[in-house]
Image (cartoon, rainbow, N blue to C red):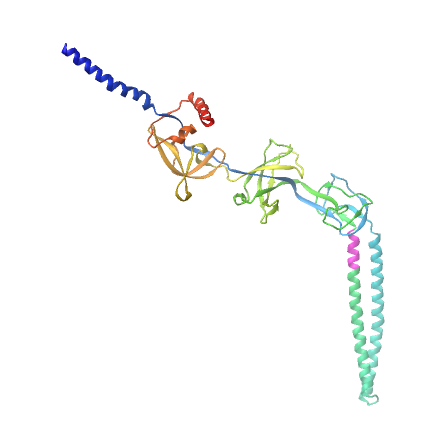
Amino acid sequence: MNSNRKWLVLVAVLLVVVVPITIKKFRGEKGTEVKVLTVSQQDIRPTILASGTLAYRTEVNLTSELIAKVKSIAVKEGDAVAEGQLLLSLDPETYLNGIEREEASRRQSLIRIERQRVALALREKQFERSNKLIAARMIDQSRFDEDRNQLELARVELKSSEEDLRRAEAVLKEAREQLEKTDILAPITGTIVALPIKVGETAIPSTMALAGAQLMKIADTSAIQAELKVDEADIANIAIGQQADVYAAAYPDRAIKGRVEQIALAPTVELQGRAYKVTVLLEPPADVQLRSGMSARTDIFLSDGSKRLAVPVEAVVSESGENNAVTQYVWVWRDSLAEKVLIKTGISDDRWDEVTEGLKAGDRIITGPAKALRVLKQGERLSEMSDDAKPAASSDDDEGDAE
């Protein structure tokens, strides 16, 4: 009987000690369920979003240098033109009259020069006689001085008339150049993309948006670019040669490839904000018809898209320490235990953060659930969430966040 009691006591002790340990093993030793990902190389392409308009790479706004009525127009909008081709003619009557006037002035100068040359020849002969007479003491010194002064005066008057002739010829040349400007020629080979002026209207020399100020616009439609406005906070990240995807208003879902060709050195100020003009040269496919003036949004890629060691952005945890110093870390799976590892990050995009220090390819990191990442502790036992459980866990995270 005593022996049976001893066995009962032993069994009771075992039940009290072993069962809780067994229960704890089956419940607690499983650890916190987490999502795990192996660190590897990823394509990272951070971007800057900018907006602007499309423009042909070479555009020329033709304006008049004269005030005159439009006499004739030799082209129409959409025509292809060659460099040097006659496009438009202004009424030349006023400038023809100016040429006739200046030609008459030039002829008068020639006549005056001819007369003064004859007078100079006479003065030279008189001075020669006076020179002989003064040597023979047949005239006095005052007469000799007077003849010499008359000779010098004749020479000065001839020089003055010759200068007048040169001035008249310069004015005549200018009048002929003005007449040539009544014929407007194509400065480049291209296409007429705008023709606001009409026959009978008066062309005026002005850069302002006035009627008659712009005659027409010619563009080389074989090359088109996007002219973008990039905020001053982002301009330091933009560099020549960076790739870009441009989405024109006419093709909102189609990315047109391009590259940064030019970055303005001076900003433009609008509504107390500063932006820099960035030019992106496009390479549109043959079936895409782009036109100058179209609005466009652009993703400018800040890297070449090469593979880099990276982790998901949701796996990186940031903490602020002393002096507001920010440290970043991830939780690493080490033999089913959580290990906090400090890291340094590089470039990033919407999905990935580049890791420059702290991890190596093949490390397994914890990426979620977000609720678990916030409360993990060093050395905490973990268990990997099964694929079937991951959607449910994600749902639980959302409910927890909602609470």
Magenta stretch, main secondary structure class: helix
Residue at the extreme front of the image, as rendered = 403
Q: Is residue 396 left or right of residue 164?
A: left
Does 130 sit above or below residue 218?
A: below
Q: Residue at x 64, y 37 (%)?
A: 295
Q: Is residue 331 left or right of residue 291?
A: left
Q: Position of residue 21 (x, y in %)?
A: 27, 21
Does 147 sit above or below residue 375?
A: below
Q: Is residue 220 left or right of residue 92?
A: left
The verdict on residue 115 being magenta is no
Would residue 15 be seen by someone viewing this image from the given angle?
A: yes
Image quarter for residue 318? top left
Q: Position of residue 131 (x, y in %)?
A: 80, 84
Residue at the extreme left of the image, as rendered = 2
- Magenta highlight range: 172-181
Residue at the extreme top of the image, as rendered = 1
Q: Position of residue 376 (x, y in %)?
A: 37, 30
